[in-house]
Image (spheres, rainbow, N blue to C red):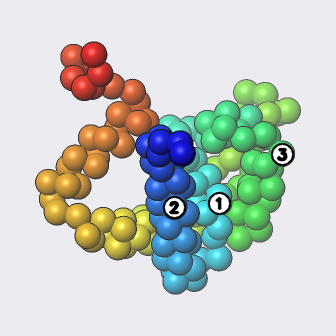
């Protein structure tokens, strides 16, 4: 008989959690009636973080996807009037992606939907547990902070 694999059990819990989080976020997005997919939502949020309109390749790099995937997402968002392609004034061969007023409005609605989804997901946790979870997630995303005890000797 083999001993239980604690990392395997943890991996399964993480997979179940990410599937649950995705379902809840998708449900809240659908309730908003924007007709935006989670991937399009991510592109809009990423686009909003740029100080000036990025190139498609910049978005692909930031989103860690192939450029063709960004093209497909931009096509859908452009058809919905949320983004537009614009020529770079310094180099006419370069196309930049800009948020439209409709895209900025959609972002406000998306933020509300994400907030509601987060409230639903975190509802079972106390404030102290939420703070602890936040710290653990920071460690998983960014690695241990300098000087922070990781509990590993």
Chain-order first, disc 2 or disc 3: 2
**In the picture provided, is 99 more to the left or to the right than 152?**
right
The residue shown at (85%, 32%) is 93
Q: Which of labels 2 and 3 is toward the front?
A: 2
Q: How many marks?
A: 3
In which quadrant of the rendered view does residue 82 lie?
A: bottom right
Residue 143: x and y in percent read 39, 27
Chain-order first, disc 1 or disc 3: 1
Q: In 3D space, how far apart are the residues under numbered discs 2 and 1 (Cα atoms)?
A: 23 Å
Residue 107: x and y in percent read 50, 63
Residue that badge 2 annotates: 16
The residue shown at (78%, 49%) is 69
**Residue 109 shows in the view:** no
| Residue count near mark 2 (Cα–Cα under 10 Å), binned few <14, some 14–19, many ≥20 | few
Helix, strand or loop status at disc 3: helix
Q: In 3D space, how far apart are the residues under numbered discs 2 and 3 (Cα atoms)?
A: 29 Å
Observer-nearest of 81 and 28: 28
Residue 135: x and y in percent read 27, 40
Res 68 label:
3
Res 40 label:
1
The residue shown at (55%, 63%) is 19
Residue furthest to the front in view is 1
Q: Is residue 75 above or below residue 94?
A: below
Q: Quadrant of the N terminus?
A: top right
**In the picture provided, is 116 more to the left or to the right than 92?**
left
The residue shown at (47%, 55%) is 13
In which quadrant of the rendered view does residue 88 lie?
A: top right
Q: Quadrant of the C terminus?
A: top left
Res 3 label:
none
**Residue 141 shows in the view:** yes
């Amino acid at each position: 008989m083999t001993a239980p694999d604690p990392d395997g059990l943890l991996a399964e819990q993480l997979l179940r959690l990410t599937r649950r989080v995705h379902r809840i976020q998708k449900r809240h997005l659908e309730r908003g009636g924007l007709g935006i997919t989670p991937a399009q939502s991510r592109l809009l949020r990423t686009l909003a973080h740029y100080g000036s309109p990025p190139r498609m390749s910049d978005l692909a790099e930031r989103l860690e996807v192939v450029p063709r995937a960004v093209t497909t997402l931009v096509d859908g968002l452009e058809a919905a009037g949320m983004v537009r392609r614009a020529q770079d004034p310094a180099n006419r061969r370069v196309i930049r992606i800009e948020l439209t007023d409709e895209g900025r409005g959609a972002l406000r609605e998306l933020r509300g939907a994400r907030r509601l989804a987060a409230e639903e997901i975190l509802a079972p946790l106390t404030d102290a547990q939420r703070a602890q979870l936040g710290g653990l997630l920071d460690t998983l995303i960014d690695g241990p902070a300098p000087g922070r005890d990781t509990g590993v000797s």
